[in-house]
Amino acid sequence: MKQTVFLILFLAATLWSSRAADYRFERDIYYRPAALDAYADTMCRLDVAYPEGATEAPVVVWFHGGGLTGGHREVPEEFQRDGLIVVGVEYRLSPHVKTTEIIDDAAAAVAWTMSHIERYGGDTEQVFIAGHSAGGYLVNMIGLDKSWLAKYGVDPDRLAGMIPFSGQVITHFETRRAQGIQPLQPTIDQTAPLFHVRKDCPPILILSGDREKEMYGRYEETAYFWRMLKLVGHPDATIYEFDGFNHVTMLLPGFAVAAEFIKKHRK
């Protein structure tokens, strides 16, 4: 589904103009259930932004991008609106740890959210997971492969929705690099979201930049991902391609469309 630049900029302006100003922050929270090592202690941290006086509020858990090798946690201002609580997650990075350990960090952060977000006024039945690029890949993995969250006693089907922004769906290129495979040689294994496509995962909003401006054919990946979800019978899978926006600038329209998705699916 393509969107015009004019419409997207209008939505973005509407989103920003309605942002709340009364958010409080609690920062640098260690989210794993037990200590691992000094590196994990530094990296496995999250920040929570919550509106003062929130009760039974929807929650967005946000995973940053950076190719699984870089980036830092962030609490997107674009989600600080409409009473949403926002959790910004940092995770360990390759080559310090394997891709599977990074996925486990993402699952541990969501499990922490399920266990603790009520103290900030959040509703555990209204938790959305979202992320850009590498963060979108993590969203796809923990939302589709139920084993990651099951390890922490959480059923991913409790999630209110999944919102991958330009997330990898074949085997991540950092995993392939570690195996000596070039970025343009695609593979699919058990660390690929496509391997775990199922019809009963939470509602999913798949976002991509312009197919001519995205990296490594990311639009075509996500289009196939969406098609497979539809073929297996998923009732609530939507894809947007943003004309004129590249892998990074697609965040601008992406936040606006994501906000509408959350509004539609909140309880």
Image (cartoon, helix red, strand yellow):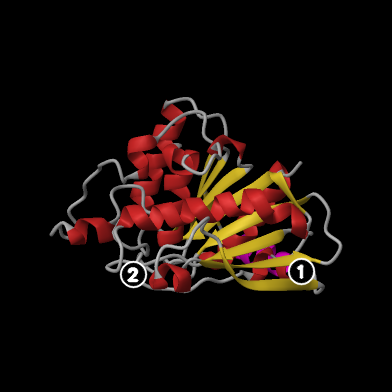
Whether residue 8 appears in magenta in the rendering, the answer is: yes
The residue at which mark 2 appears reads as 69
For mark 2, give the secondary structure.
loop
Name which residue lies at 40% across and 34% down: 197
Query: Could you say which quadrant of the image residue 21 lies in?
Result: bottom right
User: Is 174 placed left or right of 27 in the picture?
Assistant: left
The residue at which mark 1 appears reads as 19
Of 4 and 132, nearer the camera is 132
Whether residue 55 appears in magenta in the rendering, the answer is: no
For mark 1, give the secondary structure.
loop
- Circle 2 residues within 10 Å: few <14, some 14–19, many ≥20: some
Name which residue lies at 32% across and 56% down: 99
Q: Magenta residues? A: 6-15
Q: Mark 2 or mark 1, which is nearer the start of the sequence?
A: 1
Magenta span main SS: helix
Amino acid type, label 1: Arg
User: Is 16 placed left or right of 148 in the picture?
Assistant: right
